[in-house]
Amino acid sequence: MARILVVDDHPKIVRLLEVALKPEHEVLTAYNGDDALKLVNEEHPDVMILDVVMPGVDGYRVLHRVKSNPATEDVAVIMLTVKDQPDDVLVGLTVGADYYVPKPFNANDIAALVRRHLAAAAEKADG
């Protein structure tokens, strides 16, 4: 079972994603960047769904720390954020996001994206 870390400062968004992902995956949750970094290092999730706008350490800085650390650089990151201007997307992808999804979103679409990513990663590992 894949381990997915959902990071957003809005509890309703975290819960919505948790419900969509939990039937197939182990879901870890964090509500700020500091807790996200701690969980990434302790639990090494397969995928992190990460908001940008959060108190304290923002999502871009979390992303940078995850992708610049050899122990966590292989964690796939889906940015899920209201920051949807072209410059925002460029920053996220440049820093290392694997996917960049604007809010509002459909939780089932995010679950499908996670499934697709995990299937591709498994296929790559096998072949």
Image: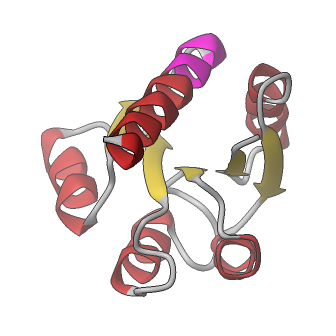
Q: Residue at x 75, y 45 (%)?
A: 10
Decide whether residue 108 is among the magenta residues. yes
Front residue of this view, candidates 91 and 78: 78
Q: Position of residue 89 (x, y in %)?
A: 23, 46
Instruction: Please give the range of residues in magenta.
Output: 107-112
Q: Is residue 60 above or below residue 9?
A: below
* Image vertical order of residue 93 relative to residue 41, above or below: above
Q: In which quadrant will I find the N terminus?
A: top right
* Residue 50 seen anywhere in this rendered image of the structure: no
* Residue occupying image coordinates x 63% and y 72%: 33
Residue in front for this viewpoint, 54 or 108: 108
Q: Position of residue 43 (x, y in %)?
A: 75, 71
Q: Is residue 33 above or below residue 121?
A: below
Question: In which quarter of the view is residue 56 placed?
Answer: bottom right
**Residue 99 is at least partly visible in this image:** yes
Residue 81, relative to residue 44: is it above or below?
above
Outermost residue, front side:
127
Image check: 42 left or right of 118? right
* Most foreground residue, 1 or 110: 1
